[in-house]
Amino acid sequence: MGRVQLRLPVLRARRRLSQRQLAALAGVRPDTVSALERGDTAGIRFDTLARLCEALDCEPGELFEIEHDAHRVPVLGGPDEDDIVRRRLAEPGARVDGPTFLAELLRQARTRPSAR
């Protein structure tokens, strides 16, 4: 996964528009454009998005960019689960919380031969 970033400043600059000019073309307030560019807003209304796209002559998808991070979420029950459990149990201070059957299951997972 990653972080979604608004490309509004880049698209606006490519069209050589100031924030005020873009706001006037899109029919939105200049402080709306400014807040969007600074990231000082939690979201964008669909009608605002449509107006900005029309003023910038772009598709909605062009306004957004996903910054991918290197983190990969492990899939429970997936092929890497046994390795994750083994590494976590090998960490200093590792302990098994929860019911006894979970502790037994983990002990068996560490001692059984891998089928891979």
Image (tube, rainbow, N blue to C red):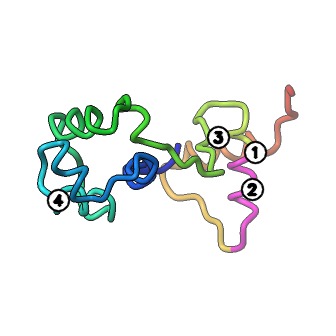
Q: For the image shown, how many numbered marks are present on the structure?
A: 4
Marks 2 and 1: CB-CB under 8 Å? Answer: yes
- Closer to the eye: label 4 or 1: 4
- The front one of 111 and 55 is 55
Tell me: 6 left or right of 73: left
Where on the picture, by quarter, is residue 105?
top right
- Mark earlier in primary sequence (3, 4): 4
- For disc 4, the marked residue is 30
Mark 4: secondary structure: helix
Mark 2: secondary structure: helix
Q: Residue at x 26, y 64 (%)?
A: 40
Disc on res. 87: 2
Mark 1: secondary structure: helix
- Mark earlier in primary sequence (1, 3): 1
Range of residues picked out in magenta: 84-92
- Mark earlier in primary sequence (3, 2): 2
- For disc 1, the marked residue is 83
Mark 3: secondary structure: helix
Q: CA distance from mark 2 to mark 1?
A: 6 Å
Where on the picture, by quarter, is residue 76?
top right
- Closer to the eye: label 1 or 3: 1
Residue type indicated by callout 2: Arg
Residue farthest along the bottom direction in this orientation: 93
